Image: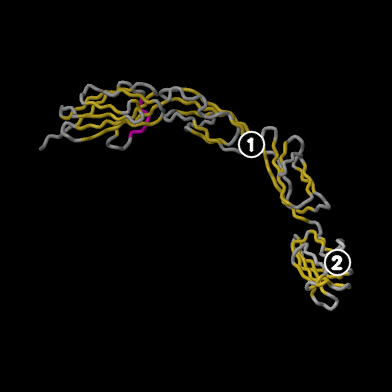
């Protein structure tokens, strides 16, 4: 039977603050250690294979200073330190006496012995409902919040003073933060509706204890509306909490359709053309006939007038008949007919 080959890693830790991480289910895993930032760390070891030292070995400490250390004599060991808190790996890679390569690693947690005083952040003011995540930092520590929680972070939705006791191998202290809350100003301009310039509507956003900014830049608590459109306002209280609202008003004025009863296209510069007068009208069709029913003029353009000519010639004096079909701004249909007098 062949003799069993034994590999012995005997490692003695000179400076060790205590293990904090869980052992990993990994054949290359060696140990877990915890250190304080900027502390000089030294690993000493003796490695033999049937009494023979390895041919060569190297330490690798990513994130440390220095980050590598090479050795070919058994009495040399690495001294290093970490300057940033967090989790790291310290790895030793070896070429054994029989020529085989292998490696083992240590999980290292570097802790800050003097965390910043505002770990939880600055005191904060919120307008209305809020959700805030509070993180005590310093991974690997023990925590006790004023809420009774023992996790590294908590989520809060109510105002108040929150504190947490943080304890680890390098630090013990308390962090706190104060969260306050203001109310959103009440604001309701009412439902969308209608307005007419003959009956203006007053929009009321509140009283003089608030500040206001309307869509046109004005800042009064009230806004008088006489024309259809969309109106909006931002309302702000003394704490800086704001609310906004808008309202859309349609034209409710009764549409006007009127055709004059006479016109005089005699080139004197007065009353030379004739056209329907419209207000609140979206579209129209207008037709003019002579007394025998022949079409003299037609248009579907609002404001387009008849100049009293037909096929380039002036029409004779007399009564002319008109017919009008129109839709108002609320899509209501209007049909009218009548007559007017043309005279020179």
Q: Quadrant of residue 312?
A: bottom right
Horizontal relation, residue 63 to residue 155: left or right: left
Residue at screen point 67% across, 32% down: 239
Q: Quadrant of the N terminus?
A: top left
Horizontal relation, residue 245 to residue 293: left or right: left
Q: Residue 89: where, in percent of width, then height?
A: 33, 32
Instruction: Give the farthest residue toward the left.
Output: 1
Query: Which of 320/112 is in front?
Result: 320
Q: Residue 182: where, in percent of width, then height?
A: 65, 34
Q: Nearer the viewer, mark 1 or mark 2?
A: 2
Q: Quadrant of residue 15?
A: top left
Horizontal relation, residue 114 to residue 179: left or right: left
Q: Is residue 60 magenta?
A: no
> What label does residue 219 carry, if any?
none
Magenta-drawn segment: 18-23
Work out whether 34 lies above or below 341: above
Badge 1, how many Cα within 10 Å: few under 14, some, many 20+? some
Query: Which of 286/104 is in front?
Result: 286
Is there any visible trace of residue 178 in the rendered image?
Answer: yes
Residue matched to label 2: 265
Secondary structure of residue under mark 2: loop
State whether the magenta stretch is mostly helix, strand or loop: loop
Q: Is residue 19 magenta?
A: yes
Badge 2, how many Cα within 10 Å: few under 14, some, many 20+? many
Q: CA distance from mark 1 to mark 2?
A: 69 Å
Instruction: Give the farthest residue toward the bottom.
Output: 292
Query: Which of 230/309 is in front?
Result: 309
Secondary structure of residue under mark 1: strand
Work out whether 145 lies above or below 275: above
Q: Quadrant of the C terminus?
A: bottom right
Residue matched to label 1: 127
Q: Residue 173: where, in percent of width, then height?
A: 48, 23
């Amino acid at each position: 039977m062949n003799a069993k080959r034994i590999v012995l890693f005997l490692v003695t830790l000179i400076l060790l603050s205590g293990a904090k991480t869980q052992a990993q289910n990994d054949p290359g895993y060696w140990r877990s250690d915890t250190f304080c930032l900027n502390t000089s760390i030294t690993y000493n070891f003796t490695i033999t294979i049937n009494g023979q030292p390895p041919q060569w070995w190297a330490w690798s400490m990513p994130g440390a200073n220095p980050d590598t250390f090479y050795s070919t004599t058994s009495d040399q060991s690495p001294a290093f330190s970490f300057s940033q808190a967090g989790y790291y790996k310290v790895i030793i890679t070896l070429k054994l006496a029989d020529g085989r390569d292998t490696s083992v690693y240590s999980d290292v947690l570097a802790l800050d012995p003097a965390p910043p005083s505002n770990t939880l952040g600055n005191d904060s003011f919120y307008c209305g409902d809020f959700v805030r995540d509070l993180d005590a930092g310093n991974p690997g520590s023990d925590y006790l919040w004023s809420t009774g929680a023992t996790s590294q972070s908590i989520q809060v939705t109510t105002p108040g003073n929150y504190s947490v006791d943080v304890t680890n191998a390098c630090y013990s202290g308390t962090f706190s933060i104060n969260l306050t809350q203001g109310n959103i100003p009440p604001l309701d301009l009412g439902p969308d509706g209608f307005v007419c310039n003959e009956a203006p509507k007053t929009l009321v956003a509140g009283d003089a204890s608030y500040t206001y900014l309307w869509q046109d830049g004005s800042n009064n608590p009230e806004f008088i509306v006489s024309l259809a459109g969309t109106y909006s306002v931002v309302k702000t209280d003394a704490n800086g909490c704001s609310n906004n609202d808008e309202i859309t008003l349609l034209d409710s004025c009764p549409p006007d359709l009127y055709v004059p009863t006479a016109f005089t296209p005699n080139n004197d510069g007065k009353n030379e053309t004739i056209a329907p007068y419209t207000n609140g009208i979206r579209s129209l069709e207008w037709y003019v006939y002579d007394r025998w029913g022949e079409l003299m003029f037609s248009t579907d353009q609002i404001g387009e007038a008849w100049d009293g000519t037909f096929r380039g010639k002036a029409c004779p004096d007399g009564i002319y008949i008109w017919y009008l079909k129109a839709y108002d701004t609320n899509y209501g249909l209007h049909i009218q007919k009548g007559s007017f007098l043309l005279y020179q």
